[in-house]
Image: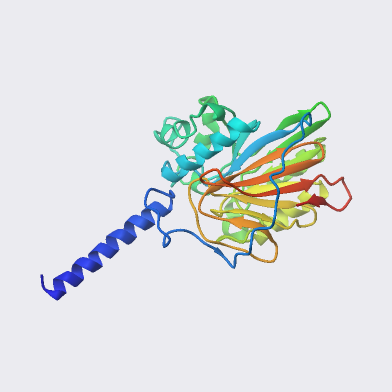
């Protein structure tokens, strides 16, 4: 073999290896190497934490929050298995899907073969035979977003009765958790999506009415797009301008989002906690900044347990290993936040 031919073979081999590595990056797949792992830039040591748990006899509501999951690949399946393990050991009432439920373009109909490939058979563990409460992501819009609403009538577990809606769960007879599930696609881009202005205004008016009427002790808003984030997409000033005033005025406790393919909990803004859980099937780089409490990447999910007095937030990696735990104290209306780490 001549030097020229040998060089070509080496270059070709490198290209093939790089292509395979990049292709597997979306799924967290079978070919893992340090050069395809995502990174937390400017990472700091994870703050000390204890594996906080519930005292016996204290009622609580547990659920999993995970977004950007629906690849159908090895990474999604690995996270699903770890979710199932957690749900089998700690009471878990539902899974909250934070958008981009079916990659890359959503589904065409309720009969789309992606439903079994990227949802039904991935989450087929006994402990995950619970409701999957879903919101739409930007990728879910490419084909037929309404099909994900209609799938509620087909699946025993999938729940998306409308593009935005509210649903409630009881902690016990004295306390309720209310979820406000948003369709952030028409909200997130401001003037870039002026043709959807009426739809955006209608949703904001709906949210104002629903939050005003809520009697729930805990109010949690879920949407796909981040409001505050140190990941690739970062902060969304337009979304903050239209949602944050409602959150503050109506004592929303936390906003859960995906969109950035990582795990984050940030310092609260005006009493509202912002949590990103977008590691269900894809991963990207993220960054640790001054407002970071915790950040991680390379797939994972969040488990939250809410009692009358506090919310326990646990972050798990793809293998189901606890990475960080944080306790958010319930603040009363008009008072500064109460929080313990």
The quarter of the image holding the N terminus is bottom left
- Using residue 69 as the reference point, say whether residue 113 is left or right of it: left
Given residues 162 and 32, the one toward you in this image is 32
In the rendered image, residue 65, in percent from the top left (x then y), is placed at 61, 42
Direction left: furthest residue: 1
Residue nearest the observer in this picture, 262 or 88: 88
Give the quadrant of residue 264.
bottom right
Front-most of 21 and 58? Answer: 58
- Extreme residue toward the right, this view: 334
Residue in the image at 61% along x and 32% along y? 89
- Going by the image, does 218 lie left or right of 48? right
Q: Compared with residue 70, is residue 24 higher up or lower down, i.e. above or below? A: below
Q: Position of residue 90 (x, y in %)?
A: 64, 33
Can residue 223 be seen here?
no
Of all residues, the one furthest to the bottom in this rendering is 3
Q: Is residue 256 visible?
A: yes
Q: How is the image coloured?
A: rainbow
Name the spot of residue 136 as percent of width and height, x first.
56, 43
Relative to 99, 78 lies left or right: left
Instruction: Determine the residue positioned at 81% across, 32% down.
Output: 175
Q: Of residues 240 and 229, which is closer to you in this image?
A: 229
């Amino acid at each position: 073999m001549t030097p020229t031919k040998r060089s070509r073979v080496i270059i070709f081999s490198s290209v093939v290896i790089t292509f395979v590595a990049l292709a597997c990056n979306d799924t967290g797949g079978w070919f893992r190497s340090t050069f395809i792992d995502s990174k937390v830039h400017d990472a700091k040591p994870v703050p000390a934490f204890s594996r906080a748990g519930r005292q016996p006899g204290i009622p609580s509501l547990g659920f999993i929050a995970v977004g950007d999951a629906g690849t159908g690949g090895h990474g999604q399946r690995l996270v699903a298995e770890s979710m199932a393990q957690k749900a089998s050991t700690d009471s878990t009432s539902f899974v909250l899907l934070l958008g981009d439920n079916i990659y890359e373009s959503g589904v065409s109909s309720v009969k789309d073969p992606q439903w079994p490939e990227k949802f039904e058979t991935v989450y087929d563990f006994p402990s995950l035979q619970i409701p999957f409460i879903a919101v739409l992501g930007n990728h879910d819009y490419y084909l037929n977003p309404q099909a994900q609403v209609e799938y509620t009538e087909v699946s025993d577990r999938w729940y998306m009765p409308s593009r935005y809606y509210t649903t409630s769960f009881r902690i016990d007879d004295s306390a309720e958790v209310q979820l406000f599930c948003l369709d952030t696609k028409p909200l997130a881009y401001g003037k870039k999506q002026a043709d959807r202005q009426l739809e955006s205004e209608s949703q904001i008016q709906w949210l104002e009415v629903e939050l005003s009427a809520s009697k729930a002790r805990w109010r949690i808003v879920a949407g796909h797009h981040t409001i505050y984030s140190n990941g690739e997409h970062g902060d969304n000033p337009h979304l903050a301008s239209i949602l944050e005033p409602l959150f503050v005025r109506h004592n929303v406790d936390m906003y859960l989002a995906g969109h950035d393919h990582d795990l984050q909990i940030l310092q609260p803004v005006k009493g509202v906690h912002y949590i990103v859980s977008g590691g269900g099937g894809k991963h990207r780089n993220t960054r640790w900044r001054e407002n970071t409490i915790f950040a991680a990447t390379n797939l994972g999910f969040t488990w939250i347990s809410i009692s009358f007095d506090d919310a326990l937030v646990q972050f798990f990696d793809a293998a189901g290993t606890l990475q960080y735990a944080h306790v958010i104290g319930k603040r009363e209306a008009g008072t500064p936040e109460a929080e313990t780490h």
